[in-house]
Image (cartoon, helix red, strand yellow):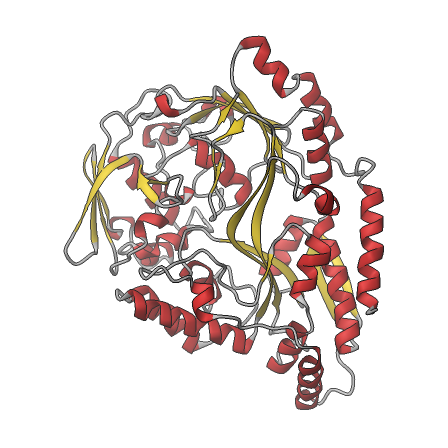
Amino acid sequence: MKKWLVFLVAIFAVLTLAACTANKDAGKEDKGNDQKQTGNADGDKSQNGEKTLYMNNSDEPTSLDPAGGFDAVSWNSLNNLMEGLTRLGKDDQPEPAIAEKWDVSEDGKTYTFHLRENAKWSNGDPVKASDFVYSWQYLLDPDTGSAAAFLAYFIQGAEAYNSGKGSAEDVGVEAVDDKTLKVTLEEPTGFFLNILTNPAFFPINEKVAKDNPNWHAEADSFVSNGPFKLAEWKHNDHMLMEKNDQYWDADNVKLDKVHWAMVNNTNTEYQMFESGELDMTDIPSELADQLIDGDNVKIEEQAGLAFYRFNVTKEPFQNEKIRKAFAMAINQDDIVKYVTKTKEEAAKGYVSHGFKNPDDEDFRDKYGDLVKFDADEAKKLLEEGMKEEGYDKLPKVTLTYNTDEDNKAIAETMQSMFKDNLGVNVTLENTEWNVFLEDQKALKHQLSRSSFLFDYGDPINFLESFITDSSMNRTGWSNKEYDKLIKDAKKEADEDKRWDTMSKAEKLLADEMPLFPIHFYNQVTIYKDGVTGVVRHPVGYVELKWADKQ
């Protein structure tokens, strides 16, 4: 038996024993106690007749400012408090939301959105076209420093303004009147309506924001325009949402309240579910074998990738063959089978399943595998790369991951695979998320753990992250041909040609290997009996507009 397989068996045994006790980081035991004081989910409903759904958000939202909350823990809240021009429907496709209809010019570059007359903010103000103009200009303002600003670069003048080379007035967004918004694009963009579902494009109540720039920081000042409003926010502890009676489609919102815990430990979350404090839970990986096929378990696709970045500016990963050797030494199939164990798919490419062209062809199926485990080829490439660099001995390699039990288990398994398949001893290092992220952005890591959840439903979203100087690149890698392919794909109106261009870009990424894939994500959730209508979109938003609880 391979050494790393023995290691996996040992890890599984340790983790199984650990599941029997609360994790010492359980956070948040004080939060768990607070939860108990509020009563369990069933008790709350029976006492006052209200339908309250109990969920876990895992962490405090980074920000409930639409331009600032560019991550999953913020999206979960924002997507239920706010609403943009379009919204992802139950079929994961964009549908009318604040905009009840729109017109598209013959050249495909101008969209005219007609806002609903009954679209209102939670304070009773009408939602105006000028609220969108204000929000999008704020998103793009260089002083805002939004990590999501690049999503708007499809809009005329947006990139120039965000990079300090243009003005807000040059951005192609105009309030024709209170209920008519005109948007002009740089080029025809067939997936523009999908992009607009991202929380970055939610409106901001201009009047409220000008009176109080920190309107989004507390419950008593937060103004929403979506299915729910923010009733309570005890930072780093919990949030409470209530049905927004001003929402244009309030008749179809069945829940009265949603209570969000903030417990960043899956074991603790599962224990809270078992004790009746939560209505749904993720499955701890060490319990996956016991629970994955149980009742009320729902497995759904999630458009995203777990991967590792090489820093091509640090030895030895300036060498392409050495990068490929490390990538090919990893057996992704065994990682999902023995470590994560929640039926993820091993990733042999970068773009996940679920993206289809007009001929209903899936991108991943159409273009096939690009990165494959091959221990013999990996060892050969390592030897060739070391010879090219004049190495008698490989420089020390450190693999860095942000603190998390699942991340640790994957990293330790990879460490064993590098030893078995390459004869290389890799040092592991873990740091807390904020430090980890800043160091990764500053190119301080050699080899580091990463994840990507798609912001909208098109392959270009992931691929564009690795153009030169992208804030999402974080590898030091730059390739002019790759940059041109991404630019061409964004301008191409013919979908067949656009897909072929994106596939060439993805292949180039695999050929030069500044990053390598581990697995595609999925969403595995156990629900209580009677919980229905929760929609988890592949791009990462959880949707409670249609949720119900009996």
Horizontal side, residue 364 vs residue 290: left or right: left
Quadrant of the drawing holding the N terminus? bottom right
Q: Position of residue 108 (x, y in %)?
A: 20, 56
Toward the viewer: 483 or 160?
483
Q: Is residue 51 positioned above or below 354 on the image?
A: above
Q: Residue furthest left?
A: 106
Q: Name the residue rendered at 62%, 52% in the picture.
A: 343
Q: Is residue 9 left or right of residue 87?
A: right
Seen from the viewer's position, the closer of residues 494 and 390 is 494
Residue 449: image location, x then y, percent: 65, 59
> Is residue 366 in sight in this rendering?
yes
* Residue appearing at x 72%, y 25% in the figure: 275
The residue sitting at 28% across, 25% down in the picture is 126
Q: Nearer the viewer, residue 327 or 318?
A: 327
Above or below for 85 versus 220: below
Quarter where residue 55 is shown: top right
